[in-house]
């Protein structure tokens, strides 16, 4: 019998990602393993802790630094061009303040992929992160760099921004590289329908050098709604399992209220605990 490769697909959503963190921590606590994971935006920056096996790390540092101007602030946006300060988020925190377990990450055989969007082509770029060294963390940062409040991340002669612009829920990509059995974690409820971006006039002005990126952002709601439909259609089959909030999480993408962050995290935990037997059965039926 062929054993199907198991994958974990993690949508973004900035601080809605606390829901994902709650789900992932329950899975870690129950030693549930996957052959690979792919994260988009917050799904990448929080999801990497699954490969490093650091239960509680993401909710911990997000609560600890929620009101720290070095983490996320307009002061950072003005001084550095990034609402979420790049040096603080991808250097100070993982290397000094809440240390990332690079050794466990590197030794864990689970693959970890991120999605970013190439600003010149408007197309998704997929990158496997083997070590989370500085350059790979820059790719992770690119995946989570929200337009208008982040600088374009320049890597190997190309510019990148948030992966959610071009591939918000990369289930099709993971299937295309051999991950046949996937657990998908979304941060919006099943009935959510994305609408056109109201900030498009500003985006067209500020990103006029990148017409393909503008086109991708104009069409993002169509792409997102198509991907959502695909995910839930696949969930009717036996090779896809979807976890999502029962209703809108009701928080800002840049939520700073610690009680709200913990509330969203707990919703994720509760759903994962309630579905734990189903998840185990899904993964064992291979």
Image: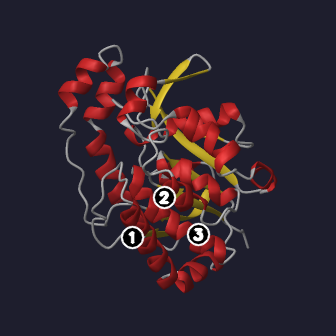
Judge left or right: residue 27 versus residue 256: right
What is the distance, in whole Å, between disc 3 and disc 2 at their CAs?
16 Å
For label 2, the SS is helix
Residue 252 x %, y %:
30, 53
Q: Are marks 2 and 1 in contact (CB under 8 Å)?
A: no
What is the distance, in whole Å, between disc 3 and disc 1 at their CAs?
15 Å
Residue 126 visible in the displayed image: no
What is the distance, in whole Å, between disc 2 and disc 1 at their CAs?
11 Å
Q: Which residue bears the numbered disc 3?
A: 25
Count every numbered label the image shows and give the total: 3
Label at residue 63:
2
Residue 3 x %, y %:
71, 68
Nearer to the camera, 44 or 123: 44
For label 1, the SS is helix
Quadrant (top left/top right/bottom left/bottom right) for the N terminus: bottom right
Q: Which residue bears the numbered disc 1?
A: 263
Please report whichever mark, 3 or 1, sits nearer to the chain's N-terminal start. Answer: 3
Instruction: Please identify, in this view, whether the residue under mark 3 or under mark 2 is nearer the observer.
Output: 2
- Identify the image quadrant of residue 53: bottom right
């Amino acid at each position: 019998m062929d054993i199907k490769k198991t994958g974990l697909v993690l949508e973004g959503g900035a601080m809605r990602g606390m829901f994902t963190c709650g789900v992932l921590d329950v899975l870690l606590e129950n030693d549930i393993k996957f052959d690979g994971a792919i994260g988009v935006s917050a799904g990448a920056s929080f999801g990497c802790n699954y490969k490093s096996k650091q239960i509680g790390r993401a909710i911990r540092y997000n609560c600890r630094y929620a009101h720290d101007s070095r983490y996320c602030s307009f002061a950072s946006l003005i001084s550095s061009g990034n609402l979420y300060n790049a040096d603080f988020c991808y250097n100070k925190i993982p290397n000094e303040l809440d240390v990332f377990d690079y050794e466990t990450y590197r030794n864990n055989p689970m693959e970890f992929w991120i999605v970013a969007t190439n600003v010149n082509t408007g197309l998704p770029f997929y990158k496997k992160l083997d070590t989370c060294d500085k350059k790979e963390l820059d790719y992770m940062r690119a995946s989570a760099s929200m337009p208008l409040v982040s600088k374009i991340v320049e890597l190997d002669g190309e510019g990148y921004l948030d992966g959610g612009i071009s591939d918000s829920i990369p289930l099709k990509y993971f299937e295309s590289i051999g991950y046949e059995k996937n657990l998908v974690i979304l941060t919006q409820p099943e009935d959510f329908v994305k609408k056109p971006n109201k900030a498009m006039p500003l985006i067209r002005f500020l990103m006029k050098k990148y017409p393909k990126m503008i086109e991708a952002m104009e069409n993002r709601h169509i792409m997102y709604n198509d991907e959502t439909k695909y995910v839930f259609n696949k969930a009717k089959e036996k090779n896809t399992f979807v976890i999502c909030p029962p209703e809108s999480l009701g928080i800002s993408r840049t939520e700073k209220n610690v009680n709200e962050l913990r509330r969203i995290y707990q919703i994720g935990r509760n759903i994962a605990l309630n579905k734990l037997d189903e998840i185990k059965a899904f993964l064992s039926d291979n």
